């Protein structure tokens, strides 16, 4: 994985850049479509810090919003249900009291 936030930002930025190039769009064109400044898009692509809002705008302009759904898989079982099932399981074992 990534050791720092900066490394993760750089990785995300390079993925955005790859999608932009695959869509054959210029920085200026995509920035205009996303409603952001070209410099803002460049900063995103270079991993120089950006907001989540900027990322979402760019992904929408690239018609790639679904990519956000791949960040975490949907939970198939509620964590609360798992906890409840664990509590209904085997009774807790307790140490027996010594009889002195």
Image (tube, grey):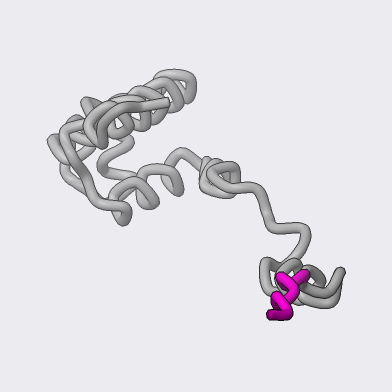
- Magenta: main secondary structure equals loop
Q: Is residue 81 visible?
A: no
**Closer to the camera, 41 or 74?**
74
Magenta residue check for 51: no
- Reply above or below: 53 against 43: below
**55 left or right, relative to 63:** left
**82 left or right, relative to 64:** right
- Reply above or below: 37 against 100: above
Q: Position of residue 93 (x, y in %)?
A: 77, 69
Q: Is residue 44 visible?
A: yes
The residue depicted at 38 percent of the width and 30 percent of the height is 16
**Closer to the camera, 34 or 4?**
4
**23 left or right, relative to 48:** right
**Quadrant that contains the C terminus:** bottom right
The residue depicted at 77 percent of the width and 75 percent of the height is 87
- Reply above or below: 45 against 96: above
Q: Which region shows up in magenta? A: 93-100
The residue depicted at 58 percent of the width and 47 percent of the height is 72
**Closer to the camera, 6 or 18?**
6
Q: Where, by quadrant of the figure, is residue 95 drawn?
A: bottom right
**Quadrant that contains the N terminus:** top left
**50 left or right, relative to 60:** left
Q: Position of residue 21 (x, y in %)?
A: 40, 19
In this figure, what is the number of numbered marks?
0
Q: Where, by quadrant of the figure, is residue 47 drawn?
A: top left
The residue depicted at 32 percent of the width and 36 percent of the height is 30
- Reply above or below: 38 against 81: above
| Extreme-front residue of the structure | 100
Q: Position of residue 71 (x, y in %)?
A: 53, 44
| Extreme-left residue of the structure | 39
Q: Position of residue 44 (x, y in %)?
A: 24, 35
Q: Where, by quadrant of the figure, is residue 2 drawn?
A: top left
């Amino acid at each position: 994985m990534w050791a720092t936030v900066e490394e993760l930002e750089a990785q995300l930025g390079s993925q955005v850049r790859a999608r932009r190039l695959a869509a054959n769009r210029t920085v200026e064109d995509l920035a205009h479509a996303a409603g952001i400044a070209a410099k803002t898009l460049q900063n995103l692509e270079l991993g120089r810090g950006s907001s989540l809002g900027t990322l979402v705008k760019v992904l929408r302009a690239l018609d790639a919003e679904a990519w956000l759904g791949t960040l975490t898989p949907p939970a198939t079982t509620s964590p609360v249900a798992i906890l409840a099932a664990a509590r209904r399981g085997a009774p807790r074992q307790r140490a027996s009291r010594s009889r002195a």
